[in-house]
Image: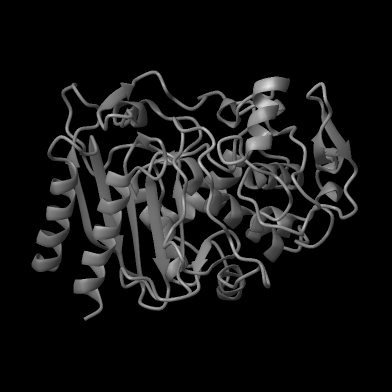
Amino acid sequence: MNTGLTSSLNHVLDTVTAGPLRVPGVVAAITGRDGLVYEGASGQRTLGQVGEMTTDSVFAMFSTTKAITATAVLQLVEEGRLDLDAPARDYLPMIGERQVLEGFDSDGSPRLRPPKNPITTRMLLLHTAGFGYEFFNEDYNRLAREQGLPGIISASLASLQTPLLFEPGEQWEYGSSLDWAGLVVEAITGQRLGEVMQQRIFEPLGMTDTAFTMTPSMLQRRACLHQREVDGSLSVLEDFILPQDPEVHMGGHGLYSTVQDYCRFIRAWLNDGQGDHGRILRPETIRLAETNGLDNLKIKALPGVIPSLTNTVEFFPGMPKSWGLSFMINDEDAHTGRPAGSLAWAGLANLFYWIDRKNGIGGFWATQILPFADPISVSGYLGFETAAYRYLTR
């Protein structure tokens, strides 16, 4: 390993876990096409408890789950079992029951109409189907408050029975589409999503610490979730664990994993679909997935509707950004050194990754803090990425 790179990145991790305004603990890694070029850990898994953060710590991955679900979808496309542009109801009839929200009546009940366009699986991967999240959309939040719609974290089928926010295909709105995409995978394969992922993704990549239901070993290494309070202090959310016997394997947010495992997934995307122990996608499928699928639409900032869960979020403010199958694409070079056309996304508890196929570099930064877009974690992550590029591309 490059000693200058290691020293620089260790400094970023140690700085972000020190002082009054800090993160409890962080694990971060950089992978090239041939393997890890850096991995490090700093801080604690749980504030106030014995147990330092280690590189094999287990994290609730939240929305970094989405790209893995999209991979399972794309595998079925390759096999001719799924047409991205066919109505998704052809595979999963209940998605055809979703109606478009046109507003609220005076008594607060939602006004609904049938959509004119059928939802396709491509729309699900692109977030153009019409689904949102209650913590990023005021209408969904109102449905939760006034109509008793369960929160998405419940991993229940009822939590997905939401109206569409617009006519399918006409806008971009980040939300629960990948949970629906996971249900499409289940309908086609006749298996639970976690079984599909285990056989078709985790085993070929050597991902032994990734699952919807944690093994005893994973539970022992789990990093606790923390809450950033208004005054900047941190409290421990010790009982906050995603459902371990979920009704739905939530393809949008439900996995637990390690940074080491996720870097194996990133590496397969750097290597045109070839993993450490087998191929998961064809090169031409990777090229399809990394292409902007939004035409003239651009992704937008995500407003923080529930402040305890998320701040308002925008990556690289002011820069145009597109969406592929299923990643954010920065349309211009980023100030960190990440080139235009790279793939990236994040998870609610301040987990961030990027995949730079041009330079053969990817990275993952994992903390366990709410709300999302925590300024301390974001600045640490951006410093980490910037330092990586300073050493790896000169």
Q: Residue at x 78, y 61 (%)?
A: 83
The quadrant holding residue 224 is: top left
Q: Residue at x 73, y 40 (%)?
A: 190
At which x and y percent is residue 288?
62, 72
Q: Residue at x 21, y 81 (%)?
A: 394
Q: Is residue 369 left or right of residue 233?
A: right
Q: Nearer the viewer, residue 389 or 165?
A: 165
Q: Is residue 148 visible?
A: no
- How many numbered dots are placed on residues in this image? 0
Q: Is residue 226 left or right of residue 83?
A: left
Q: Is residue 166 visible?
A: yes
At which x and y percent is residue 344?
45, 60
Q: Nearer the viewer, residue 345 or 374?
A: 374
At which x and y percent is residue 106?
83, 25
The quadrant holding residue 340 is: bottom left
Q: Nearer the viewer, residue 131 or 191?
A: 131
- Name, please, the residue furthest toward the front: 106
Name the quarter where the N terminus is drawn.
bottom left
Residue 233 drawn above or below residue 83 = above
Q: Is residue 229 left or right of residue 253?
A: left
The quadrant holding residue 208 is: top left
Please name the colour scheme applied to the rendered image: one colour
At which x and y percent is residue 272?
49, 72
